[in-house]
């Protein structure tokens, strides 16, 4: 991703493992670096990205906040 470039995805179109991978890749961090942000291991990140484990909502929000990723919700009418 180029500095200053904005990436938007509709999370409803993706599985949790893909969303976490998109988040991590947007930071240019390794799995180890990304997991370390919230005191997790590289193995945790690999398990989440591999679909073998789920991520807690609090961890998801903490990762977003630490990495300056904005999470928004839109209610369709």
Image (cartoon, rainbow, N blue to C red):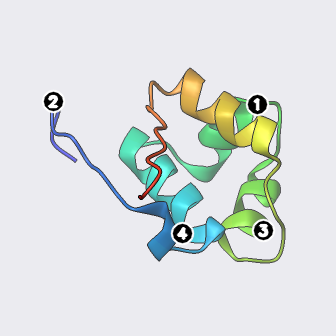
Binning the other alpha carbons within 10 Å of mark 1 as few (below 14), some (14 to 19) or many (20 upward) gives: few
Between marks 1 and 4 in the image, the one whose residue lies nearer the viewer: 4
In the rendering, which numbered label is found on residue 4?
2
Q: Secondary structure at mark 1?
A: loop
Residue at the image point whose x is 41% and y is 39% from the top:
27
Q: Secondary structure at mark 3?
A: helix
Residue under label 3: 47
Residue found at the very far front of the displayed protein: 77
Q: Is tag 3's residue or tag 4's residue first in the polypeptide sequence?
A: 4
Binning the other alpha carbons within 10 Å of mark 3 as few (below 14), some (14 to 19) or many (20 upward) gives: some
Q: How many marks?
A: 4
Q: Is tag 4's residue or tag 2's residue first in the polypeptide sequence?
A: 2
Residue under label 1: 38
Spatial CA distance of label 2 from label 1 is 25 Å
Spatial CA distance of label 1 from label 4 is 19 Å
Spatial CA distance of label 3 from label 1 is 15 Å
């Amino acid at each position: 991703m180029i500095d200053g470039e904005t990436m938007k995805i509709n999370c409803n179109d993706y599985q949790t493992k893909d969303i976490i991978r998109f988040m991590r890749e947007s930071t240019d961090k390794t799995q180890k670096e990304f997991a370390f942000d919230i005191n997790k291991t590289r193995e945790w990140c690999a398990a989440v990205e591999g679909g073998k484990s789920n991520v807690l909502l609090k961890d998801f929000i903490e990762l977003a906040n630490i990495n300056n990723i904005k999470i928004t919700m839109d209610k369709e009418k």
